[in-house]
Amino acid sequence: MKDQGYYRKEHGACSVQKTWSLQLVTLADTRSTYGKSLEIREHAQLLVVGAGPAGLAAALEAVRRGLRVVLVDEHPVDYATMATDVPFHFGQRMSGAVRNRGRMLERIVEADSQFAQAFEAGIDIRLGIAAWGLFTHEAGLRWVRTRIAGLTNGEEVWFLQYDAAILATGRRDVGLAFPGWNLPGVMGVTAADTLLRRYDALEARDLLVVGSGAEATAFAMQAQKSSRLIVALVEAGDTTVDQNGSQRLAAAGVPIFTKSMIASANGGTEGLQSATIVALGNSSEKRSVACDTVVLASGVTSAIELLDVAGAKIVFCPERGGHVPATDAEGRTSVPMLFAAGDCTGITPDKSRDPQVAADEGCRAASAAAAALSINAGRNWSVPTATPSTTSEIALADRIAWANAQLAVADQGTHVCQCEEVSATDLIGVRPPRYLERNQPATCARSLATLAADGPINQDQIKRLTRAGMGVCQGRRCREQIGAILAAVTRTPLTEIPLPTYRAPVRPLPLSAFAATEEAAVLAENWDVWFGIESQFEEPLPKRFR
């Protein structure tokens, strides 16, 4: 093949330019994935991920506009995945009913009347199917020729090609570490609400709620309606966040403790039995509360993982709860033909109280997707510009307050990252993983303070040094609280703490699920790239590598 080369030779202040034809001999790299085939099982004109208020509304609106829609939702989540606290922090508070997949499917459909409308409209609904990755033709993925989604039912994986997609992946909880928070019975408010209202499988009687925002008060009132007892509500701030909701709970007899924190969750292998509440600033003022469940509602954040691995631009907006995709008013992201709607675009009190707000976002995204498909807009995509934050970091001041509260009660055994057993002390001291030598002078000399003095704090750097956030939950329980601790200790604005990296699959999957996928022979023959390098095992090694 011929290619044009370029020649430039300097002669003092002048130069001579010349072009020539160069005969190139190219050899195919048999180990490269470029040019290899990818088996795609099915096609969807519009793929909607998430069957909450936004996703269902988007699917219904899209069908009304004449689109063929495939709607996938990972619920009901299988028991093994729930036991690893994915996608939410379930805290082992799911009843045995979740093992009955048929019952869970029926319950999910019964819990939302829009499912009946969706079935009637002819939407291809896939419950119990998770999207673990979205891929397009880009740097590092040039062998992917089209827009594809990786799907799984937990037992196998496959690829679906789509023309446009709307992600309505919802929200997840911000973790909060304190002594005993790893006990069965400590769970997130999103998980608790899902088990209560969507699954009807919450095995809890006496609940202590941590936090006083709209998510906390709405769940507490719903739990009361289902004959659960709210033993207390704990808030780290001087006043409650959702004052109207808190007043209603107080009028119903719920004790509310402000400027307080859980000093410890107490129990054993059978689970939580009580919690000790301490007044912040006065550690001698403690009270014990009997409960079998602690619901962490101190913060929620958008579930952006799928958007992030798809290549969508992610920005930090305090008024929307932290890191969110950059979108326009119609949910258009920076990735061609990819839209977002609902909680994954940002958390607001109105959206937490009224699901219609998310549903309206879903309808707007569906309308925009239909318009884009009608003119094949993916070829000339209008990238949305990031909307500047309209508020200061005061919007997330409560996250810093909770970070300081957990540091006030943490001990050496309080693991901020439960998966990798990284304590708050290890995090602040930037201590290496426990399986390495931890008492070397070089490692003992490092801390958050010395790292901050060297340059901006980066959560990826902390992850590599301590392994905090590298566990099976992929940082879902610790990502935001680690960022808040880093900000609080180093006095760095949260907006300046970068989002740590992660990769697909965004859901933990057994290797057996991928093993069942048939690969082209040319891929299977050359997967062991390193063993094809003749010099790899030559002896002796160069001195610099010994």
Image (cartoon, grey):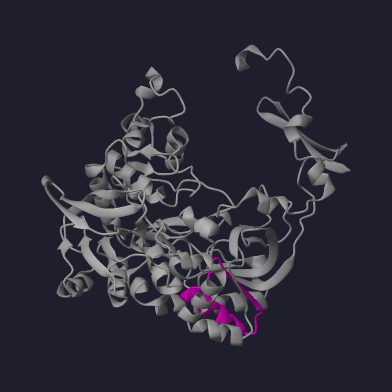
* Total numbered circles: 0
Q: Is residue 409 magenta?
A: no
> Between 211 and 221, which is closer to the camera in this rendering?
221
- Residue 69: x, y in percent? 64, 77
Q: Position of residue 320 (x, y in %)?
A: 37, 63
Which quarter of the image is occupied by the N terminus? top right
Tell which of 433 and 336 is nearer to you: 433
Quadrant in which residue 230 is drawn? bottom left
Q: Which residue is at a point 47% across and 35% down the rendered structure image?
A: 464
Q: Residue 528, image x and y in percent?
A: 75, 36
Along the horizontal axis of the image, is 531 left or right of 220? right
Please tell me whether residue 15 is drawn above or below residue 356 in the rendered image. Answer: above
Q: Viewed as shown, does residue 218 lie left or right of 261?
A: right
Quadrant assignment for the C terminus: top right
Q: Position of residue 74 (x, y in %)?
A: 55, 65
Q: Which residues are magenta?
A: 49-74
